[in-house]
Image (spheres, grey):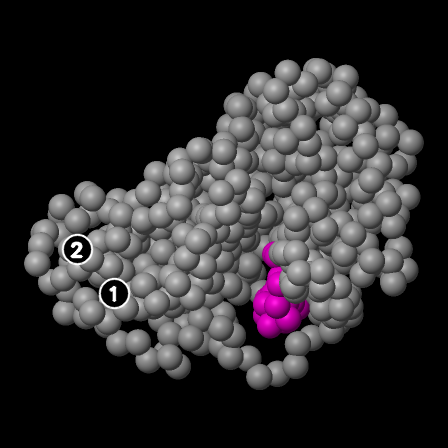
């Protein structure tokens, strides 16, 4: 049997391993570490917290419905999956009944089906009972080799017009330039919006009343973020709102190409621009925490879920208009509604407590995947998010062995391998990655996906061969 010391193992395995041994320490009593809410009282129907948008005057629910991850079912024709419209209708109805009135979608969400499903569900209700936010998601259009500016404009306009049809509306309440700052930074921004004339077109559409509020969502290149705010300062363009990634971990611990949310939010506050928040849970990471961190949160507020802490923290900032959550399951919707019905703002003492919690979480580094699925579909059929998230789950659950010297090596080895096969079909696992790297440029978190897939593949093989 080949054994290596811990230092060599960490160097070989990289991110995530450091947390494994620590996460596996200590008692694991389910009742003590259950990260879910244990409230038994009914979910309030009339206590939702609202923020008034300082430009339009809209009274927006602080909880917004992110429509990226609608529930899916097998396609009746046997080809892939389709959105489960019946369940979407149930979720939308429940959200509206409990005060949620902001629904955020995109032409590219849900394998291109989100807008249609969202529009079908919402159209069953009065148009003045909800706000629709959708996006100009022309990322891939601008990346077509040798595409002309005129063709970028034509295809982008076609996408824009189709959104009206899919969402069954004749105006958008909130419209965004989607995920600027990614791919090639300023070059991509110019290609998508400035050189093609798409942004000027959208500004004219706003003047016509087709768009009520115009803004952008940002990932990645801070030069792009600052440039857009400079245009606002100079009066060349006016941003009614901006969507940023913000949570208590990213406040001062942003990784990769992301920038600390403390800076992003501060820049918006300076300009009196209200923020819409994405990734309040960092792709679920702040709701699926290492067990000792869960215990820390539960000790302070025993009935609250881990997610509730994150939602309350971000909602406590006054220039946050709305906090988005992709709620696939009714239990998630109910828990989040409870967190904001009404919002009990965190205290300054709570903020210090969560800063200390963030420091603890950073001692257990994970692969920074937030399951956005921008990397999908993989041309070779890999389930990239499924692979990365299984790895992260094993770090949190203490099922990532560092060597055969671990006291629970056999148990952890089996948990990782069995769980991997259950989570990700064999033909879609990391060992089938060809390293084509079509995925990494699309990742908002700037993960070197081929490198991570190779690392996980090597780790899995060492477990299978018992050579760790």
161 left or right of 232? right
Image: 330 above or below 135: below
Give the percent coordinates (x, y) of residue 319: 63, 45
Q: Is residue 305 magenta?
A: no
Q: Please state the total of marks drawn on the protein image.
A: 2
Q: Which residue is mark 1?
A: 413
Other residues around mark 1 within 10 Å, as few (<14) / some (14–19) / many (≥20) = many
Which stretch did the figure color magenta?
325-343
Residue 326 within the segment the image draws in magenta: yes
The residue depicted at 49 percent of the width and 37 percent of the height is: 439
The residue sitting at the front extreme is: 78
Helix, strand or loop under label 2: loop
On screen, residue 114 versus residue 259, left or right, reads right
- Mark 2 = which residue? 468
CA gap between label 1 and label 2 equals: 10 Å
The one of 152 and 50 positioned closer to us in this rendering: 152
Rendering coords of residue 63 (x, y %):
66, 58
| Location of residue 158 (image quadrant) | top right
Q: Is residue 398 visible?
A: no
Left or right: 74 as drawn, with respect to 183: right
Q: What percent of the width, then of the height, locates residue 449? A: 41, 40
State if disc 2 and disc 1 touch (CB < 8 Å). yes
Q: Residue at x 81, y 54 (%)?
A: 119
Q: Quadrant of residue 141?
A: top right
Q: Earlier in the sequence, mark 1 or mark 2?
A: 1
Residue under the point 33% across and 80% down:
29
Q: Which mark is residue 45?
A: none
Secondary structure of residue under mark 1: helix
């Amino acid at each position: 049997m080949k054994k290596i010391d811990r230092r060599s193992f960490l160097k070989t395995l990289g991110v995530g391993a450091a947390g494994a041994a620590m996460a596996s320490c200590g008692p694991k009593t389910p009742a003590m570490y259950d990260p879910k809410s244990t409230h038994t009282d009914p979910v309030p129907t009339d206590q939702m917290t609202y923020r008034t948008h300082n430009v339009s005057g809209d009274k927006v629910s602080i909880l917004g419905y992110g429509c990226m991850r609608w529930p899916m079912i097998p396609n009746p024709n046997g080809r892939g999956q389709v959105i489960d419209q019946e369940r979407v209708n149930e979720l939308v109805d429940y959200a509206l009944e409990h005060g949620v009135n902001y629904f955020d979608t995109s032409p590219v969400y849900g394998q291109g089906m989100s807008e249609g499903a969202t529009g079908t569900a919402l159209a069953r209700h009065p148009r003045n009972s909800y706000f629709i936010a959708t996006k100009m998601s022309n990322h891939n259009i601008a990346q077509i080799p040798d595409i002309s500016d005129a063709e970028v404009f034509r295809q982008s306009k076609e996408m824009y017009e189709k959104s009206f049809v899919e969402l069954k509306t004749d105006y958008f309440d909130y419209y965004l330039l989607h995920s600027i700052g990614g791919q090639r930074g300023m070059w991509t921004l110019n290609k998508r919006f400035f050189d093609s004339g798409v942004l000027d077109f959208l500004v004219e559409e706003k003047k016509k009343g087709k768009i009520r509020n115009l803004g952008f969502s940002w990932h990645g290149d801070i030069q792009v973020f600052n440039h857009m705010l400079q245009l606002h300062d100079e009066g060349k363009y006016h941003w009614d709102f901006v969507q940023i990634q913000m949570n208590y971990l990213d406040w001062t611990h942003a990784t990769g190409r992301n920038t600390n949310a403390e800076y992003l939010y501060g820049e918006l506050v300076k300009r009196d621009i209200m923020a819409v928040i994405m990734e309040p849970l960092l792709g679920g990471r702040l709701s699926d925490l290492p067990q000792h961190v869960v215990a820390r949160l539960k000790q302070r507020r025993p009935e609250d879920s881990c997610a509730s802490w994150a939602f309350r923290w971000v909602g406590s900032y006054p220039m946050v208009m709305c906090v988005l959550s992709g709620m696939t399951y009714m239990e998630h919707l109910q828990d989040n509604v409870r967190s904001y019905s009404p919002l009990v703002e965190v205290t300054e003492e709570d903020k210090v407590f969560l800063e200390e919690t963030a420091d603890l979480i950073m001692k257990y580094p994970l692969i920074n995947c937030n399951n956005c699925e921008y990397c999908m579909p993989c041309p070779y059929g890999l389930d990239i998010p499924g692979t990365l998230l299984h790895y992260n789950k094993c770090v949190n659950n203490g099922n990532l062995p560092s060597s055969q010297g671990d006291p629970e090596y056999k148990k952890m080895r089996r948990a990782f391998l069995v769980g991997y096969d259950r989570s990700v079909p064999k033909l879609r696992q990391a060992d089938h990655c060809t390293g084509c790297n079509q995925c990494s440029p699309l990742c908002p978190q700037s993960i070197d996906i081929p490198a991570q897939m190779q690392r996980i593949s090597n780790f899995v093989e060492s477990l299978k061969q018992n050579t760790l």
